[in-house]
Amino acid sequence: MEIETVSMDEINGVSDLNIRKGDPVQNLENLRQSIADIGIQQPLLLREKDDGYSVVAGRRRYTAAKELHRDTVPARVKDISDDEAFKLSATENIQSESLTTPQKKRLVQHSLDRYS
C-alpha cells in the first residue's frame, strides 16, 4: 500500500467506528512539537467516506496536524469494510496501551454488539 500525500481539506474527521471518537485528545504537546520539528513519521490510515476520507488509525496525529494548520499529511488510503476499519482502529488503540477504562468498556461492548 503506497503512501500518499493527502490534503487536510479532504479528510472529514475520524471514523465513526473509532472507540475514541468524541473523547478529548489529550497530551498532544510532545506530538505537536515532534510533527513541527520533523513531520509525521507514521502515515495515517484513511478510507474513502462520502466526498473525502475518514481517519481509521492516526487520530492523534491527525488532530495534532490540524492544530498545526498543516495543509497535507502522509497517509495510506485503503478500501476497507466497516468491520475491517473497526478491527484496525481497535488494534491500534489496544497497541498504544493508553485506553481508559471507559474506552475499554466501549471497545468490548461494540465488539459484542457487532460480532455476537
Image (tube, grey):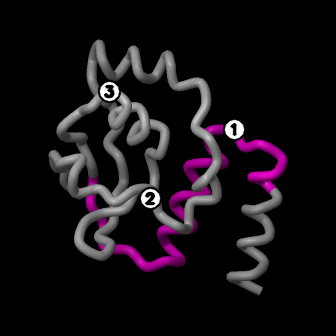
Up-down: is 38 above or below 60? above
What is the number of the mark on residue 97?
1
Q: Which of pointers 1 and 2 lies earlier in the amino acid sequence? A: 2
Circles 2 and 3 in contact, beta carbons < 8 Å: no
For discs 1 and 2, the disc positioned in front in the rendered view: 2
Q: Residues within 10 Å of mark 3 (few under 14, many from 20)?
A: few
Q: Position of residue 9 (x, y in %)?
A: 21, 51
C-alpha distance separating marks 3 and 1: 25 Å
Q: Element under label 2?
A: strand
* Pointer 2 local density, CA inside 10 Å: few below 14, some 14–19, many at least 20: many
Say which residue appears at 75% left-offset and 52% top-offset: 103
How busy is the neighbourhood of tag 1: few (under 14 within 10 Å), some, or many (20 plus)? Answer: few
Image quarter where the N terminus lies is bottom left
Instruction: Estimate the x, y position of residue 49 in percent, counting from the top left.
Output: 32, 72
The magenta stretch spans which residues?
A: 76-104
Would you name the residue on which mark 2 appears? 56
Which mark, by number, is residue 68?
Answer: 3
Q: Position of residue 15 (x, y in %)?
A: 47, 63
Q: Is residue 43 left or right of residue 98?
A: left
Secondary structure beneath label 3:
loop
- Residue 23 vs 1, above or below: the answer is above
Residue 109 inside the magenta-drawn segment: no
Tags 3 and 1 touching, CB below 8 Å: no
Instruction: Based on the picture, tell me whether residue 100 belongs to the magenta stretch.
Output: yes
Quadrant containing the C terminus in the rendered view: bottom right
Depth order, front residue of 59/13:
13
Disc 1 to disc 2, C-alpha distance: 17 Å
Q: Quadrant of residue 107?
A: bottom right
Q: Amino acid at mark 3?
A: Leu
Residue in the picture at 72% in, 43% down: 99
Which circle, 2 or 3, is nearer the viewer? 3
